[in-house]
Amino acid sequence: MAVTASLSSELIARPPSYYVRRRLLRNTPAMLGLGFIVLCTLVALLGYWVLPDNSPNANNGLVQLQKEPPGFQATILQLPLPDSNRASSNPLRTWWQGQEPRFREVPIAGYRIEGDSLLTMPYQNHSALADQAQRYSLAAVAGHAGPVATLRQEVEQERIVRRTYWLGTDKSGRDELSRLLLGTRVSLGIGLVAVLISMALGMLIGAVAGYVGGWVDSLLLGLMTVVWSIPGIMLVIAISLALDSKGVWTSFVAVGLTMWVDVARVVRGQMLSLREKTFVEAGRVLGLPQSRLIWRHLLPNMTGPLIVLATSNFAAAILLEAGLSFLGLGVQPPAPSWGLMVNEGFQLLGTSAGFWLTLLPGLVISLLVLSFNLLGNGLRDAYDPKTPLG
């Protein structure tokens, strides 16, 4: 009886998606890639909430701290800004745009308190001239008047902070870790927008070309061939010139409009093989309109190849954006684009900071693109019925 029960459990009919998930979960490289993608997505969604420097674009640079190595620590004196009390602290606005600085920050090498004054020693960087020693009243540093003992305690506990730059600083003295984390928004955002645009446009053109056939197919296939022959970077430059802009959203749209040909060719090929199937003939006999046959019956049968192609286009979009930003044609400063950060580090090669500032953004670009490629390979194997279940 036990043997019969086990055999019957093995013979239970399961949907194809069950076997797809099973094959994918057993693919260790694909799951590692998916894990890194999920981690980057979580960082991008949390945004400024998890950044050490949550100023807009993580652009709070201290020129005295420029080009410092990873693990560097500094003592910072925070001086209240005149309008700091009116600064908005809306969590949603901070998540989307960052928090405007409430203090003017001054790196110091040391300090001592003399009466009702704070005397600070200048911080000297290896690549910047040292400032002069400064004297501040305790009331000005604290932002209000009060007893000297109270002001002294408040200044030492709240206005003089010890900060660690875990990945060092760039040539403008900005926190490299914050800009790398915020750069995930740009890379994943441009990948998502590019995939959505390319999938929508490619599915529409490919489905019409493959299903209608005839002169329509020849015309659309000629359009695909022409667009296919133009390098992606040249297309993005042309689209940016046509839109007369080089902002973040222009880069998103331009990259998306250069990647639809891959999708269209795959959809057209699948459509040519599926349109003669029995279920399509049955739909025609029943009088179903062509639009319903395409969108409700044909395209759902292409889910596997389209998902695999979407992951591939995601990785290609990230690389294309990084290359454009490296050349100065994509995302513009001070937005934290990984390609732009590689360019900034490349300009400093030959210095002690150039190696780290080039390696770190290049490494995260490589890891994210590798993760999407591993996931794409895993999905391709998972949708292949010939792949063993393990």
Image (cartoon, rainbow, N blue to C red):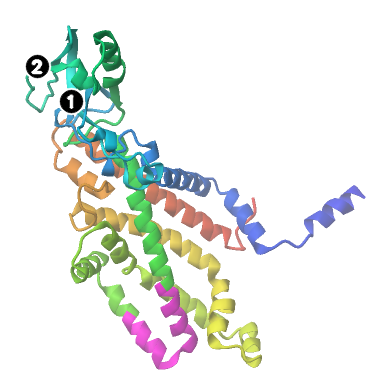
Tell me if 16 is positioned left or right of 241 in this view.
right
- The residue beneath circle 1 is 106
Against 224, is 160 above or below? above
Q: What type of secondary structure mainly makes up the magenta span?
A: helix
User: Residue at the location (32% across, 42% down)?
Assistant: 98
Residue 143: x and y in percent read 23, 24
Q: Amino acid at mark 1?
A: Val
Of callouts 1 and 2, the N-terminal one: 1
Residue 383: x and y in percent read 57, 62
- The residue beneath circle 2 is 133
Q: Amino acid at mark 2?
A: Ala
Tell me where residue 216 sits by quadrant. Answer: bottom left
Mark 2 surroundings: few (<14), some (14-19) or many (≥20) residues within 10 A: some
Range drawn in magenta: 201-223
Tell me if 262 is positioned left or right of 133 in this view.
right
Magenta-drawn stretch contains 131: no
Residue 259: x and y in percent read 35, 67
Is residue 123 shown to the viewer in this render? Answer: yes
As helix, strand or loop, the secondary structure at mark 1 comes to strand
User: Residue at the location (52% across, 60% down)?
Assistant: 380
